[in-house]
Structure formats: structure tokens, C-alpha cells
Image (cartoon, rainbow, N blue to C red):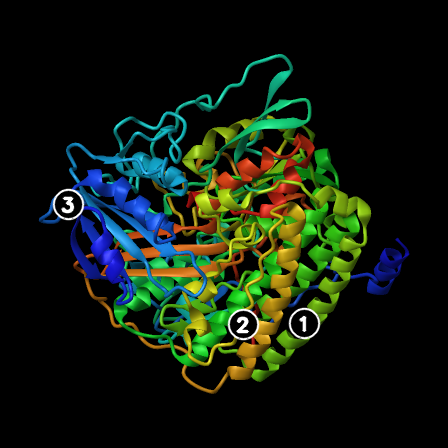
Amino acid sequence: MLRILINALRTGVVTTRYPAEPSMPPDRFRGAPVLRPGSHLPPPAVCPTGALTEHFDAGRRHVALDLARCVFCGRCAEDPWAGAVAMGRDFELAARSRADLRIEVVADGPAVPAAEPAPDPDAEAARAASEIHRVLGRSLHLRHLDAGSCNACDWELSALLNPVYDVRRLGIDFVASPRHADGVVVTGPVTRNLETAVRRTVEAIPDPRIVIAVGACAASGGIVGESYASAGGVDKVLPVDVYIPGCPPRPQAIIFGILVALGRLDARRPPRDEKREKPASK
Amino acid sequence: MDALRSGAVGSVDAHAGPRPSDLTLRLGRTGDLPAAATALVGPHAMALATIVATDETATPEGDLKVRYVFEPTVPGAPDRFVTLLVSVDAAHPEVPSLTKAVPAANWHEREMHDLFGIVPVGHPDPRALVVHDGWPRGVFPLRKAFDGSRRVPVEPADEFPHLVAEGEGVFEIPVGPIHAGIIEPGHFRFTSVGETVLHLDARLFYTHRGLEKRMEGLAPLDAFYVAERICGVCSVAHGLGYCEALEQIAGVDAPPRARLIRSIALELERLYNHVGDVGNICAGASFHYGTATGLRLKERLQQMNERLAGNRFLRGLVVPGGVRLDLPDNLLEVMVATLRDTLTGLDSLMGRIEGNPSVVDRLDDTGVLQHQAALDLAVAGVAARSSGVDRDARRDHPHGAFADPGRPDLHVVTVSEGDAMARVTVRAVEARESIRLVGEFVRRLEPGPLRVALAEPLPGGRIGISAIESARGEAVHWLRTDAGGRVERYHLRSPSYHNWPAVALAAETAIVPDFPLVNKSFELCYSCTDR
């Protein structure tokens, strides 16, 4: 017993100060890809999840990237496109709508700003956020719901409870019963075999409730997509309040997303200024 | 080899393959299957590695085929797979069930029934396995005629058909699929008298995502990203298994430096899993200091993974043809220092566990898996070695840097107790061995290329097979390309697939409150079982 106490004291405090202090991911971390407008951007077929798309407008090629679908594999930033796409280090990507997770640039031409989201849904989201903030205050008790994940997102959620992230310091906790929860964090694309269980679990949570889609599969179907066995994303089955991109999102990215859901942090907005476009230095 | 060739019952053709060291025996009649399989598992001491069904109705043979793949179990036996191949009439798809003679075939045969409509005649437990909740009758998703890209409507959940025991004081406890903690989904139906578990029926495949179908028709280099994401904590192992099968088909070898980096990645994956698992087992035994320490050590390793590979699960390191990223000296120094601290932390944690009578009392004699049961079910990995089964795919089917002549020695540790304590002990010993092996691999690193190109399209109509020792045990990958060099069929038999039935057996030696502990001591993946 004494040994345990001595060891615990010797270990000291290992808990991160994120989000009070920023977290800088390591050099090799693959965050949001940065597309360089005007360069030779890769064809959509490069992307294993279909996150890259292209269309032509007035004869100019537009390339769009859907961060909800992206699995951050880095393939579009490999040769021969390394000059056109760089894997940035931005991981605070959570957004209230899928539209906010879309990055669009004009290939072989000057930059165009991403499409502004329609004002109405935006105001709606803000109203929802303020209502959630009013009812649930600054604390959030969540139920985890595995809707067919590969377990990577699940392990990152359980990492939130380890001594390093310790999300209870932020008023966030995971509870055993949906009846005790203010909301749900869903991982996985919603498999056919779990669809009924997913619906029933969410219905068991008292209203108002928050639904947070964690990871590419939950946010969009990700690598799984839509199939005989998969709905292709949580929003095919339930309304989603916050999407957290990543494959899996690192624990700080999940903390960021949960705080966005609580209205304590601002969600990601489509990049409008040059600051966000800057690639991470190697 | 000759003994296998000549002694095979009903064999009409024998040839080497898929690899030159392997043997494929084609049986003339499906009726000879049980006798041929019994000869392999009996006199030849082989175990079932995997069963792969394929729909070949579009080929000139116009049939379904089933390949029953066996592997040696004797330490030191040559690296060889023996495949029994039978042709199944697509109009009357029936094969005799092997489950009574080869218990490990149980789930494979049920899965083959669900996904291909091939009926294992005489199967003792012919319930649906993979498809749930009003799945339409007569629809088989892995048949080529089935369009897998569309959703199939969900009917209300059907009652799980399970073994019902009656008697005074006998009651049932249904648990899941949604659990109280942050874990994967599965349904467990306990039949108990008081605290004692009489019977446990597990229903899995809730996370069945149709990934094998998803990969069909893709260019093999694209399908890799799916294979790497079948399971989070087996990302390196499954990515590597797919790559090795693919590289066989392409006829290329990853360069030596890449093979060493692959083996380093595989040991790092084993290490963060084993260390985290020891912590989680402490959670099952209500030893919170142990839980926090295990999770802290695991977190440090995953932060190191992020520095090495850009991803906390080491995704994006292994790629077809080699590795995507080098491990330069500055990162190797970070790695060696982290592993040194991990070793100190793990030794201290194990000291606290072994010196704590209340923890030891929970672990000793809990969830015993008998040696014979482990053999019969072809149990893999830590669970097998904790029940005295001396098998490790790193030695039995050398992969990564273990395939090199200058490979380091591997110490395969077995203990005979078969209880939760044995599984903790084996994990701790293996974690230390992984740290030692990483040091050995780092010493062998020489400058050199990281990747060879795989020319597309890949050769058509070829089979690749590989077996990788993941943190959970041996995973067997089977891949075949179609005439255009695309993925025709990919099948993964994960270690958890063979180990889940063993959890149910071990739980029957325990009390209900110990089930979480028994389960954590096996620590199996649902996602790579369900795919």
C-alpha cells in the first residue's frame, strides 16, 4: 500500500492543460489536408473514401474535400501531388454541419472562398447551441454508443478518462445508462445489425439531447460507406448536432468537439483567411 | 509433404500452392471432407487456420468453392498451409459439416451459410451468425449476384434464439448489445443459478460492416485502406497481413529496411495493447491504481506512435510494397527512451499486482481455459499460450523481419494454468519481449529503400495467404485477384474469431461478477471478428 502511495506521488501530475493551453501535434501528425489553389490537384480516384470530388464551373476545375469523409491517410499528399496537397496539423475540426466540413478550391486557378453556408441553418444551429447551453449548463454527461466502429474511436473515447486527458476536470463524464445521459457520442457508421439498438438507446435519453458523431465512419460512413450492412453515417438514422472528423480523431479533437457541442467553444468554420491555409512546417 | 499428399482421403489432385511451400488437395467428392479433415487434425497434428468460400459461378466451372485451410501446430514444423478444396454445386449448395470433428469450424460454417448460402449438413448449431433482425431469407450477401452497395431494410429486432435452461433458481441475465462502459457491442445471455454461470451464449456480429464485400472489385492498392481499418487496435497487423498477401500475388518482397520497420511497428502495436490490457484487467479486478498506471503507460506509447507514424494507432506506416515513413535516428532515440521508461513502469506495475493479495485472489483460478479446449477451438495468441499451447505466428509463419535469415531469436512463452492470472503474466512477459525485439530490430537497421512499386494491374487469378501474429494472436489473410487484377475475394480470420467461443467456455467456470474480468483477460476485438 505504501509503495502504491509513493509511486503515485513520484509520478506527479500527468494531466494535460488542453484546452486552456493549445496542443501542438507532432510534425508527422496528419490533420486537415491543405489544398493549394492553382496547383495540379489529384484526381478524386486517389481518395479511398471518396472525400475528394471535382466539378467544372465555367470551364475551370473545382476540387472539393469533405473532411467528414477524410480518413487522413495522406495518400493525396504523396507523390506526385505532394506540392498540391499537404497534410496540415489542424485537428480542431468539429463542426455543427456537414457543409462546414467542406473545403473547395479551384485547381489550376486562383483561390475562391468556400461556399458560405446558408444563413438560416447557421442561425438555427446557433439557437440550438444556446438552448443546449441554457438547459445543460457547462457540464455534460454522455453515453457512448458503438454503432459499428473499428474500435479506434472507442479507445480514444476511453482515453479521455485516463489520467492524461481526465475529461471530468471539464465537467464531462461518461455514464452507464442512457437514462442518465444528456447526450450520446456515436462511433461507427451505424451497421444494419445495430440500427435498432442505436434508435432505442437514443430514444431512452431525455430531451433535449445532443448527438455527437465521432470519427469518419460516424460522420459520413467513412471507409465503410453505405452498404447492405451499413447505413453510411449517423445522420442517415438520427439528427446529428456535432461532427468530429478523424480516423480516429485524437483525444484533444474529441474534447474540442464535445466543448463545441456544449457551446463552450466555437465550431470550425470554413477557412476564409490565409492563416488556415498555411501548411504545417516540417 | 509426400505423406500428406498420398495419405489424403478422396484427393483427385494435389499441387503446391498458394505459396510454393503450401499444398492444395482437391477432393473429388464433398463427402470425403470429414475423413480428410480428421486425418489432418489427427495424425498430422494440424489445426484449422481458416475456411474461405468463394462464388465462382461466373467462371467456366460455374460453382461455389470452399477452401478448408489447415496449418501445423507442432513447434518447429515447416511454414506450410494445407488447403482442402471442394467444389459445391450452386443449385444444391451443401457440404458435410466438420464441426463435430473439428470444433474450430463451427462459426466458419455458420458464416458460410449466412453469407453464401452453403449449408453445412449435420451442423450441431445451425443458427444464423452474421445476419440479424429480419434479414431476408435466401439472400446471400457475398454471392457475386448480390449488389452489396444498397441498404437492406431493418426489421424489428428478433429474439435471440438461445439455449434455455429450466429449473428452480435458474434465471437468465441478458446483457448488451449496448454496454455500460466504453466498449464494443455484443449480446451475452447468461444462464445462472445464483452467482454461478451455467451457460453463456454470446451473440456477436453487431459490427458486421460488410467489409469483405466492400473490398471486392477494388484495385488492391485502394482496398488496402479498408484492410488497415478493419480494426483499430490491430491496424498494423491487419494492414501488414493484407500487404504480405498482396505482395505474394505481385511477386515482390518489401526491402529489408521496410521489413524491419514493419516488425518494429508490429511489436509497438503489441506493446501498447498488452500494457493497456494489463491496466484494463486491473479495472476488472477493481484495482484502480493498476488501471490508472496501465492507461498512463499506454497513453505515453500512443503519443509516441503519433510522433513516429502521425497516428496514435500507427496507421499510415505500413503500405503495400514497404513502409510509407522512415524511422530516422532522432525518432529512434525517442522510441528507445520511451520503451526504457515503459519497461520500468511495467515492472513496477506487475510488482504491485503480484504483491497485492486481493488482486491475485480475483485473478487466480478465474476463467480457466483447458488445454484441450484451446487446441480443439484452435485458440490463438495470449489465450492459447496461457493454456499451454505453444504457437506464435512470428515463429510458425515468419513475417516482417522474422522472414530474414538474420532474424533475432523469439522466445515464445507458455504457461499451463489457463486462468486470468496466466493471461496477465503472459502479457507482461510478451511486452518485455517486444521491447527487447524492438531493440534487436533497431540494431539491424541499415540504410536502404523503403518501398518497392507494385505494378498495376496486378497479376490476375492468383491467391495470396499470410498469417500475422497480432496483439490478439494469429490472423490469417486470404486474398485472390480476378482476371483484371482487382480484388475478387478477401477474407480475414482474426484471432478473436477463434477465441470468442473460448471466452464462453472459460466464463462457465466463473461467477457472473467475474465475467468482466474473464472477458478483459482475453481482451478480444469485436470489430475484426465481425468485419
Task: Using residue B448 as the reference point, say whether residue A122 is left or right of it.
Answer: right
Q: Which residue is mark 3?
A: B28
State how far apart marks 1 and 3 are (Cα).
Answer: 57 Å
Q: Quadrant of residue A230?
A: top left
Q: Is residue B374 above or below residue B171?
A: below
**For the residue marked with disc 3, what is the amino acid?**
Gly
Q: Position of residue B439 (x, y in %)?
A: 59, 77
Q: Which residue is mark 1?
A: B338
Task: Using residue B29 as the reference point, say whether residue A166 is left or right of it.
Answer: right
Circle 2 packing at 10 Å, graded few (<14), some (14-19), many (20+), is some
Query: What secondary structure is found at the residue carrying circle 1?
Result: helix
Task: Using residue A156 as the reference point, say whether residue B205 is left or right of it.
Answer: left
Residues at marks 2 and 3 touching, judged by CB atoms closer than 8 Å: no
**For the residue marked with disc 1, what is the amino acid?**
Thr
State how far apart marks 2 and 3 are (Cα).
Answer: 65 Å
Q: Residue furthest top?
A: B168
Q: Chain of mark 3?
A: B
Which numbered dot is residue A278? Answer: 2
**For the residue marked with disc 2, what is the amino acid?**
Lys
Nearer the camera: disc 1 or disc 3: 3
